[in-house]
Amino acid sequence: MRLPPVIALLATCTLSLAACDSAPPSPPPPPPPAGTDAGTEPGDTQAPRTSVASSRPAEGSQGLYPVELYYDGTASRPGVYLRKALTVTFTGPMEPSLAQVTLSNRTDTSIEPRSLTGQWSSDHRTLTVTLPAPEEGGPPLEASSTYALDLTRLKDAAGNPLDGAPVLGDGKLDFTTGARESLLEHACTHALVNTAEALNAAPTPFAFPPTTDEGHKRYRLTLPGGEGSYQGYSEFISAPDADETVTLFLSREVPLTVRNDTEGVDVPVELLATEPACAGITHRARFGATAGDMIYQLHYGPTDHATFEFILERQTK
């Protein structure tokens, strides 16, 4: 029996749908070849980019000491010179062939920006930029000035530009320097150049303590004791006709108490950390000395180090 045209059409559609339902699903797309990672090709800005993890100085920091004094024995004129090192550590390895940065003084814009080349660590994650003193003279960084270290020419190991967020934002490390201190830098020259006089501190103030009162001198003092606790004494004689401020620039933090033995009174001592102006000086101890050839007993410790050094400076009040 011949089916009416409409019924025949419906039957044909039903058979077609059944055939579609029974067809096998399409196979999934093949995985990417081994060793590839989608989204990490050079220049792929959609992938997470490397950014700054930390820096020294920190972004936006204030009061950075502008210089570091160091001794260069290989120079044509061996002596004490100035430099300053800045370091930046990144969240991932960087492209080692790119190490050029630019330093700009934002306080004095008449100073031309300096193009500098840093040195990468072995893992290519930390860049150290050492600023020498400019050839035309002056310090590596001016005191009390705001600077910007432009890192935007750097790229990560995949060739992506540096992501300034969240630490830098604009890709520039901003910081402000503090003031310089002449007495500290003067003491640094003695710490770097002078040969230390080695002395043994006395165990008590009555056991003939060594005299440590020569200005501009570098002393290396060994304290008696043991089992991680050391302490001892040295002696200081005040000037005959002028009150003074006495400063010991120390190679490490050492507790110090001072007694005017002539008058039988204790003398206040100020112990502070110093700015990182040079190797060999980390702290200073300061006290006042009264004129009159008075005897002062300096008591060091207790401390966990037997030996330390100091530069002694005397200033008339």
Image: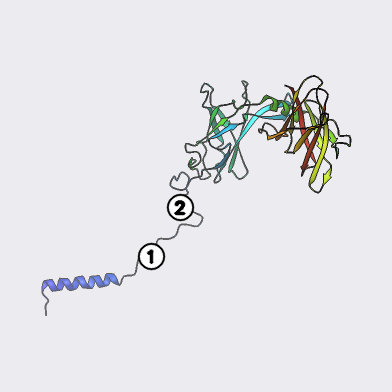
Please identify the quarter of the rendering in which residue 135 is found.
top right
Residue drawn at the location 51% of the way across and 55% of the way down: 35
Q: Residue 163 in the image: x percent, y percent? A: 48, 42
Tell me the distance, in whole angstroms, between the alpha carbons under discs 2 and 1: 21 Å
Amino acid of disc 2:
Ala
Q: Earlier in the sequence, mark 2 or mark 1?
A: 1
For residue 44, above or below residue 240: below
SS for dot 2: loop
Q: Is residue 102 visible?
A: yes
Q: Is residue 17 left or right of residue 98?
A: left
Q: Few, some or many C-alpha atoms within 10 Å of disc 1 (few <14, some 14-19, many ≥20)? A: few
What residue does disc 2 label?
38
Amino acid of disc 1:
Pro
Q: Is residue 73 visible?
A: no
- Residues 38 and 29: in front is 38
What residue does disc 1 label?
27
Residue drawn at the location 23% of the way across and 70% of the way down: 16
SS for dot 1: loop
Please identify the quarter of the rendering in which residue 205 is found.
top right
